[in-house]
Image: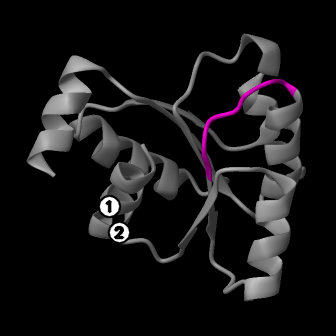
Amino acid sequence: MAFDFLKNIISQKHILIVDDDKNILRIFGDLLQKRKYKVTTGSCFADLGDLEELPDVDLVLLDCFLNPPPSGPEIALRLRKAGIECPICFITAKNASIKEENELKALTHDTHFLHKPVSAVALLNKVSEII
């Protein structure tokens, strides 16, 4: 974990967090920024602006069920169509079945999952594992 911290100082990784829960955005954002990640947040698809102009990101943490729509999986497809190929980690409060997770993985390559509630340790471990 210490090595990851030093690696991020040298080559800062950029994480996009999209979640309609403002507390999640704040808590995840603060936690990741303390670990020297660059963080961009949005609470809905409209917050992302023009996908073609979205800055380079190394990881997208994406809530599955956003209000207002579109949903996380729909946003993931739009990101891929816009040429954004970084890993996507879906965050969900719903315990998805293996079938549902496999269907989401089939939609977009390099797909991962975190299930709410997410502890600080689980978030940092998953981010470190992915990037």
Q: State if disc 1 and disc 2 touch (CB < 8 Å).
A: yes
Whether residue 85 appears in magenta in the rendering, the answer is yes
Amino acid type indicated by mark 1: Asn
Which residue is at the far top? 53
Q: Secondary structure at mark 2?
A: helix
Q: Residue at x 73, y 28 (%)?
A: 84
Q: Residue at x 74, y 11 (%)?
A: 53
Q: Is residue 82 above or below residue 97?
A: above
Residue 33 percent location from the top left of the image:
30, 35
Amino acid type indicated by mark 2: Ala
The quarter of the picture where residue 13 lies is top left
Question: Left or right: where does residue 44 sit relative to residue 123?
Answer: right
Q: Toward the viewer: 23 or 92?
A: 92
Q: Quadrant of the C terminus?
A: top left
- Residue beneath disc 1: 125
Label 2, label 1: how far apart the Cα atoms are:
5 Å
Whether residue 77 appears in magenta in the rendering, the answer is no
Which residue is at the far left? 2
Question: Left or right: where does residue 128 sit relative to residue 88?
Answer: left
- Find residue 122 and name its label: 2
Magenta highlight range: 82-88
Residue 73 percent location from the top left of the image:
83, 56
Q: Main secondary structure of the magenta part?
A: loop
Question: Left or right: where does residue 62 sit relative to residue 125?
Answer: right
